[in-house]
Amino acid sequence: GESVGLHLPTLSVQEGDNSIINCAYSNSASDYFIWYKQESGKGPQFIIDIRSNMDKRQGQRVTVLLNKTVKHLSLQIAATQPGDSAVYFCAENYGGTSYGKLTFGQGTILTVHP
Amino acid sequence: EAGVTQSPTHLIKTRGQQATLRCSPISGHTSVYWYQQALGLGLQFLLWYDEGEERNRGNFPPRFSGRQFPNYSSELNVNALELEDSALYLCASSTGTSGDLTDTQYFGPGTRLTVL
């Protein structure tokens, strides 16, 4: 079926720690994955993306890992800061009849304690 | 550069009424997408418009409709409102690069629709 799910609904970390947010997807045909951050009262903000022909991509303080064998995606945030507190969503796009449609997971709430 | 803008910020309607939500994409973007974010249900894809045409539609009833104007702004209309239509409606835009799955969607702040 069409679904992107998350292993952990909440994650609590201390400031300065590294955070890892996980996501499982069910469609092996998915070709493009995106992580979004949504702060309270705001729309989702693009963080980083990765295509299925890659297994790792790095940005500023963030890294996305893709394991196609087990259909798993993760977002790593280095030196987590209080400003990183938000809901994080993974999303997938697999084209075909679903072209243009992003399928989102339920989200993980990240709380960073100072 | 201005991001995606949406209006109104909040909208309160009663059951059976019609709601109209508006979206202006990032300058230079031709594709506009609409998503519904209901409490506890994550983001659900509603509609995609590109170059004035509806390109794809999610699993929503026909009373959810919209259009895209020549300036690429878009309108979402919800007829015969039901209580369960209460949600945050998010608009996103992208460059509309044809055939490119990696055409990143950038979101606006949303319109909070409350149906009483």
Image (cartoon, rainbow, N blue to C red):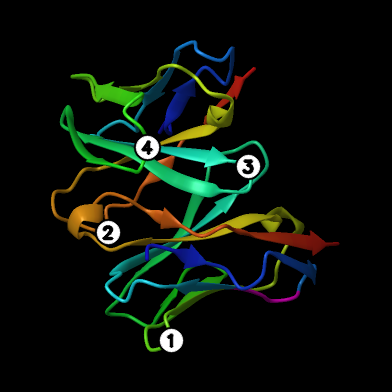
Of callouts 2 and 3, the N-terminal one = 3
User: In the visual, does A82 lie left or right of A99?
Assistant: right
**How would you classify the magenta stretch by its main secondary structure?**
strand
Q: Which mark is residue B39?
A: 3
**Chain that bears disc 2:** B
Label 1 sits on residue: A70
Instruction: Give me the disc on residue B47.
Output: none
Q: Quadrant of residue B14?
A: top right
Task: Report if residue A80 lies within the magenta region.
Answer: no
B94 left or right of B55 in image: right
Mark 1, secondary structure of its residue: loop
Q: Which residue is mark 4?
A: B60
Q: Are marks 1 and 3 on the same chain?
A: no
How far across and down, in percent of the image, does residue A41 sit? 65, 36
Residue farthest right in this picture: A114
Q: Which residues are magenta?
A: A17-21
Kind of residue at disc 2: Thr
Query: What amino acid is found at the position of numbered circle 3 in the picture?
Result: Leu
Give me the C-alpha separation between circle 2 and circle 3.
28 Å
Amino acid type shown at disc 1: Val
Labels 2 and 3 positioned on one and the same chain: yes
Mark 1: few/some/many CA within 10 Å (<14, 14-19, 20+): few
Discs 4 and 3 share one subunit = yes
- Quarter of the image with the N terminus of chain B is top left
Position of residue B110 in the picture relative to residue A3 (left or right): right
Q: Which residue has dot 2 on it?
A: B102
